[in-house]
Image: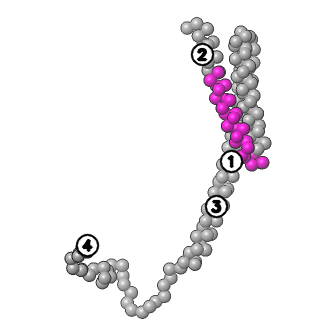
């Protein structure tokens, strides 16, 4: 295959990636509106890195269309470095989010357990002794075993 074929495939792939990145930035901006103040700063950094990726993709396309191949390796290296930094920051945000979720989950479980213990005290099943012989679970009540006549249908 000739190099022109790979050149065109490369441009197509980066254009597709650019479209995905634009959509991702839009989603990230929406998320940034909903996160807490503590997470907002980190999320803004993530969004900023995504915008830098957009610029890197755009620079790559520009250099490809202008046949300025001598700068492509530099742009590729910058995009790879940015990608590694992006992954590092995202992993940190994920770790913090999971820790917060686990802490909240444990607190909720403890609260539910305390609520269950309190409600069980209010709805105690301790019955007082009312006299007579206690029945074992093997015995059947008289009413349950008593047979009745045939069923009469009423119209």
Q: Which residue is mark 2?
A: 9
Horizontal and vertical percent for residue 62?
72, 16
The residue located at (74%, 49%) in the rendering is 36
Residue sticking out furthest to the top: 2
Horizontal and vertical percent for residue 15?
64, 21
Q: 25 or 119: nearer the eye?
A: 25
Task: Determine whether the residue tagged by mark 3 lies in a helix, strand or loop.
Answer: helix
Say which label, 3 or 2, has the lower sequence index: 2
Cα separation, mark 2 vs mark 1, equals 38 Å
Neighbour tally class for label 2: few under 14, some 14-19, many 20 plus, Cα within 10 Å: few
**Image-based side of 139 in relation to 99, left or right:** left
Horizontal and vertical percent for residue 57?
70, 22
Cα separation, mark 3 vs mark 2, equals 52 Å
Q: Is residue 92 visible?
A: no
Whether residue 132 is in magenta: the answer is no
Say which label, 4 or 3, has the lower sequence index: 3
> In the rendered view of the protein, which quadrant contains the C terminus?
bottom left
Horizontal and vertical percent for residue 95?
68, 45
Q: Which residue is mark 4?
A: 155
Q: Which residues are magenta?
A: 15-39
Say which label, 3 or 1, has the lower sequence index: 1
Task: Determine whether the residue tagged by mark 4 lies in a helix, strand or loop.
Answer: loop
Q: Which residue is mark 3?
A: 108
Task: Determine whether the residue tagged by mark 2 lies in a helix, strand or loop.
Answer: helix
Q: Are marks 3 and 1 in contact (CB under 8 Å)?
A: no
Q: Which residue is mark 1?
A: 97
Say which label, 1 or 4, has the lower sequence index: 1
Residue sticking out furthest to the bottom: 131
Nearer to us: label 2 or label 4:
4
> In the rendered view of the protein, which quadrant contains the N terminus?
top right
Nearer to us: label 4 or label 3:
4
Nearer to us: label 1 or label 4:
4
């Amino acid at each position: 295959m000739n190099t022109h074929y790979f050149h065109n495939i490369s441009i197509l792939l980066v254009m597709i990636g650019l479209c995905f990145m634009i959509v991702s930035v839009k989603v990230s901006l929406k998320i940034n509106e909903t996160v807490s103040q503590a997470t907002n700063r980190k999320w803004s950094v993530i969004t900023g890195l995504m915008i830098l990726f957009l610029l890197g993709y755009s620079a790559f396309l520009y250099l490809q269309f202008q046949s300025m191949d001598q700068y492509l390796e530099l742009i590729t290296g910058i995009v790879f470095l940015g990608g590694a930094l992006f992954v590092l920051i995202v992993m940190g945000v994920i770790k913090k989010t999971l820790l917060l979720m686990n802490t909240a989950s444990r607190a909720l479980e403890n609260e539910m357990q305390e609520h269950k213990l309190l409600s069980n005290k209010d709805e105690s099943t301790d019955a007082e002794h009312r006299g007579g012989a206690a029945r074992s679970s093997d015995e059947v009540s008289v009413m349950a075993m008593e047979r009745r006549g045939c069923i009469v249908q009423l119209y």
